[in-house]
Amino acid sequence: MIPFLSRLSSARATWRMLTATIAAVGAVAGSFAYAGLTPQFVGEPAATFVVDVMPAAIVNAVLDTLGSLAEPASFLLALTLVTVGLSIVVFGALQLEAVADVQYLAVSLSGGLVWLVTALATGVPVAAVAAGVPAATIVGVVEVAAARDPLSVRRDRTVDRSKRATLQAGFGTLSLSGLAYVAGRRRTPDSSVPYLDGGNRPPVAERALLTQAGDDAFDLANAPGLISEIGDFYTVDINTIDPIVEQEDWSLSITGSVDAEFDLSYDELRDRTADRFYSTLRCVGDDLNDREMDTAVWTGVPVTDLLEEAGPDESATYAVVHAVDDYWNTISREALERSYVVYGMNGRVLPREHGHPVRLLVPGNWGEVNVKWISEIELVDERRAGYWDERGWDGTGEVETVAKIWSVDHGDDGTVTVGGHAYAGLEGVETVDVSIDGGDTWTEAEVSAPLEGEPRDVWRQWRYSFEPTADSHEVVARAIDGTGAVQTEEPSGSKPDGATGWVSRTIDA
Ligand SMILES: Nc1nc2c(c(=O)[nH]1)N[C@H]1C(S)=C(S)[C@@H](COP(=O)(O)O)O[C@H]1N2
Ligand SMILES: [Mo]
């Protein structure tokens, strides 16, 4: 047999493959230890890739079946992909070494190639060293150990000798990966967010709103108050690892059908007169009684202030709002003119997962148009499909009215208190009706005081206590909005344009 072909024989290749996989795991671990969950981590471009290449139908099916597990699952898939990819690279280097028959060639080659691939994928050459070095080290350790092994004197024992070295390297890498995990966790940016003016509590104006909401809130079991805490506030976005945008690197461009396009820096935005207001967000994908609905105190500048400076054309009837994560969405000119570019949440700097440093807040409309990590507002003359429009959704307009039954509390005296949150967008919630007989008879629930201010886009809490007269009661709730319109009874799922119908729960006495 031709000598170099025998060196590529399958038995040996299997062990090279294993070495390559260990080196790839080491590279991923090294990269994580250095970068944490940031875009410099080699897993992040893979995660983006997973989301981008997966057909929309699959993404939706996965989200439906896995729910909140979808994100960790897609991250695991991304990590697997990246490990397989890098191990193919290292395997290539090992095979090349065998063909060329140059001892230790694969050490520098695999280190260099892993570095190159990581640098190209992340765009950060310096951080990519943290992936290249472990890969080279692991291949080096295996090769040196193998060369030292007395059995290796005889060429044909290559498989046996590398077996031992490879297994040792494998166990070593696994234990170091544990340390890398701990290190990477510590490098992941702190999710505790500073207060807006750098103090140790919210600035006065925000504090006043937070205090008011705190005073007016019902204390409902298993449900939030009138303000959702950062950390409890739901998050929905297309990213497995959210972008990190520094304030000093951020700018917003106003472009398209305007007299004068212009860019705005973070400092320039902060210098403008800001408003503070309550506003509720709800995802169009939120199931009827689910919890993708929350409220915060937001701090930001009305978009009309920026439009005044840009001078939009008469013909500009829509705006396409772009973001750093390649997400985009379209809203009507009318919705744009009631929007805010927001940089504060509950008196704190806008957190990373909610779009740091600046997002759009569109009072009254579904969550998906509230573009996070905003980069550009492009005025256009015709409506354009947004990210979710392209995936079969129709959720850029105003929200549906809903009363949730989130809270059921059995008192010691046998009374049952049910309650929850009701939201009707810009119309506001006027009252909530409750039925404990499946909708035959209705009573007005007690509702929390309406949080004042403009816009009026904020939920209210409701609660109702009753003495059970049967083993179980079918409790139904419906909201009535500020115009007197009753929440529609007609049931529909969330796709494409938001869930409708009345929430109903069977509650045992
Ligand atoms: N840049 C960007 N903005 C985005 C999204 C996104 O994926 N990327 N998701 C949207 C969706 S579908 C919703 S419901 C809201 C959720 O905002 P939150 O995560 O702050 O609750 O953000 C919207 N803004
Ligand atoms: Mo959403």
Image (cartoon, grey):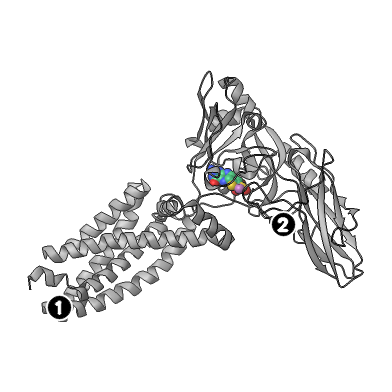
Q: Residue at x 11, y 77 (%)?
A: 155
Q: Residue at x 78, y 35 (%)?
A: 453
The quadrant in which residue 368 appears is top right
247 left or right of 161? Answer: right
**Mark 1: which secondary structure?**
helix
Tags 2 and 1 touching, CB below 8 Å: no
**For mark 1, what is the residue?**
152
The quadrant in which residue 69 appears is bottom right
Which amino acid type corresponds to the residue marked 2 in the rendered image?
Asn
Q: Residue at x 80, y 58 (%)?
A: 220
Residue 289 numbered mark, or none: 2
**Mark 2: which secondary structure?**
loop
Q: Residue furthest top?
A: 259
Q: Position of residue 408 (x, y in %)?
A: 80, 63
Q: Residue at x 76, y 59 (%)?
A: 406
**How far is the residue under mark 2 from the one under mark 1?**
67 Å
217 left or right of 297? Answer: right
Residue 288 numbered mark, or none: none
Which label's residue is closer to the chain start, 2 or 1?
Answer: 1
252 left or right of 199? Answer: left
- Tell whether circle 1 marks a residue whose Cβ is less than 8 angstroms from ligand 1: no
Q: Position of residue 95 (x, y in %)?
A: 19, 65
